[in-house]
């Protein structure tokens, strides 16, 4: 029988990303178990010619996503945001982001271009 995981809890230590209390998102050993499929890395142009690099399918606690985005923005000197759980960086940063994510142990699949 499959293990049932809670979807919601009133426990302040409950994490919606890993569905555990206390949170195990920061544990590198748990990273491989939570990331069953490769991250999607893509570039999309906007209507005015500007574009964003998107990192999709990242299973991580929201505060850790914000920290990762902050590190990328500082390292690459660009702006960025998180929309619906997808990290977006201004400009075409696919090559640099791919190298960084692979160095952190993630599998990456480039979509398009």
Image (cartoon, grey):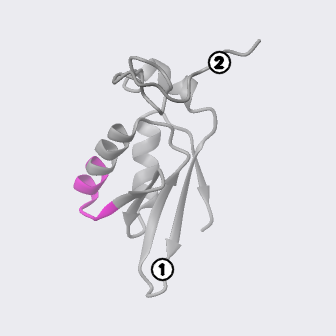
State whether residue 86 is above or below residue 48: above
Q: Nearer the viewer, residue 48 or 17?
A: 17
Q: Name the residue under label 2.
A: 4
Which residue is pictured at 59% across the width and 21% down the height?
A: 5
Residue 15 location (% of width, % of height): 42, 28
Examine the rendered structure and indicate whether residue 33 appears above or below residue 101: above
The residue wearing badge 1 is 46
Magenta portion: prevailing SS class:
helix
Image-quadrant location for residue 35: top right
Residue 112: x %, y % from top left: 62, 65
Q: Is residue 105 left or right of residue 57?
A: left
Q: Is 13 displayed left or right of 60 in the figure?
A: left
- Rendered residue at 45%/36% (across/down): 60
- Quadrant location, the C terminus: bottom right
Q: In which quarter of the image is the N terminus?
A: top right
Mark 2, Cα crowd under 10 Å, few <14 / some 14-19 / many 20+, is few
Residue 10 is drawn in which quadrant?
top left
Place of residue 33 in the rendered image (x, y in percent of width and height, measured from the top left):
57, 23
Q: Residue at x 45, y 85 (%)?
A: 49
């Amino acid at each position: 029988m499959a293990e049932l995981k809670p979807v919601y809890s009133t426990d302040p230590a409950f994490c919606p990303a890993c569905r555990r209390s206390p949170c195990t998102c920061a544990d590198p050993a748990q990273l491989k178990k939570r990331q069953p499929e490769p991250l999607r890395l893509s570039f999309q142009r906007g209507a005015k010619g500007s574009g964003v690099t998107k990192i999709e399918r990242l299973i991580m606690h929201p505060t850790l996503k914000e920290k990762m985005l902050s590190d990328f923005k500082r390292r690459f000197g660009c702006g960025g945001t998180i929309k619906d759980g997808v990290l977006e960086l201004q400009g075409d940063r696919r090559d640099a982001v791919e190298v960084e994510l692979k160095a952190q142990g993630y599998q990456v699949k480039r979509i398009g271009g």
